[in-house]
Amino acid sequence: MTATEIIKILDENNASRVLLLCHHNSDPDAICSAYALQCLIKMFKPNMSVEIGTGNGISRLSKHVLKSIPIVVNENPNVEKADAIILLDTNTIQQLGSLAERITKTASPIVVIDHHAAHPETEQLAKLIITHEEAASTCEIIYSFYKELDAKPDLNVAKALFLGIAFDTRHFVLANSSTFQTIAELGGLGVNAQETLATLSLPMDFSERVARMKACRRAKLLKIGNWIIALSHVSAYQASAARALVDLGAHMAAVAGQKKDNIEISMRCTRDFSLETGIHLGRDIAKPLGEYLRGMGGGHATAAGVNGVGDVELGLKRCFRLLKEKMAKQ
């Protein structure tokens, strides 16, 4: 049992204030899973204060989602006053940005809920870790809590769960059979798939278009066997630029960006690349690259990110080296 364990921890600590934390630049899976869990806790603990927070804001797409679903996110949460802290879609403390150090100092119990394996440092801090790597999104895990407790999500919660799943599966491209079962059940709760999916359609602004084109112009194309690897750099929209390079034909793309001494690298690859090479971008590339850059990295099999210290050229070279080493062992 998992949801039951969370409630048990809240009861054992006489918790009256619970803080649900999402990673920096929180995506729809993060904020929607937090919202669904917030509503679930309030069903069983109506007098409990349950707040959703993030250390470094939410993504532009998440802000767009907030226009259609009543999710309230505090970008300056009071960590010290929380009686219990639950991390959603966040497997490393560093993903909490400016809140990371405060989390390491808290005496309150920490629970981690994610569809990625937790980082060893996080495992040492957490009282309870709930990770299901077979789940395509954190929203799927939260929906399983509803079923475990025989609770029925209202329409807003059902829509939020649907959006989080749709986002993290790239509109179901990465979905598995259990994902489709969940989607069917959410549809039975009243979610109109076509209308709800439209919420994830965000017009591309001028700056993002320019970043994508710059990334393509600056791209260095390399080959490992029959695989095309694209390496590039832009000052913003690295994730979007990496997706654009893959859409154009690269099997795997890494796009870096730099602000002073800090470096960010976004990686994307095709599903075929991941399956045939056996490479999981988050585990095999982003994690060791983050450690090399004295930062943190992680993510999915086909989408991952790194934050660290260094320069663009060094980071991309190391990324390519890790790819070559991993593929040579296959």
Image (tube, rainbow, N blue to C red):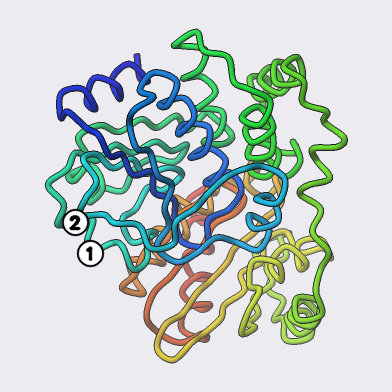
Label 1 sits on residue: 101
Q: Amino acid at mark 2?
A: Thr
Q: Nearer the viewer, residue 17 or 260?
A: 17
Q: Residue at x 65, y 50 (%)?
A: 66
Q: Position of residue 138 (x, y in %)?
A: 51, 36
Q: Nearer the viewer, residue 116 or 141?
A: 141
> Is 184 above or below relative to 133?
above
Image quadrant holding the N terminus, namely: top left
Label 2 sits on residue: 104
* Residue extending furthest toward the right: 194
Q: Secondary structure at mark 1?
A: helix
* Residue extending furthest toward the front: 47
* Badge 2 density bin: few <14, some 14–19, many ≥20, Cα 10 Å: some
Q: Are marks 1 and 2 in contact (CB under 8 Å)?
A: yes
> Is 137 above or below relative to 54?
above
* Residue extending furthest toward the bottom: 260
> Is 118 above or below relative to 237?
above
Distance between mark 1 and mark 2 Cα atoms: 5 Å
Q: Residue at x 63, y 40 (%)?
A: 164
Q: Does the rendering let one see residue 278? A: no
Q: Position of residue 276 (x, y in %)?
A: 65, 43
Residue 143 figure quarter = top right
Q: Residue at x 50, y 70 (%)?
A: 319
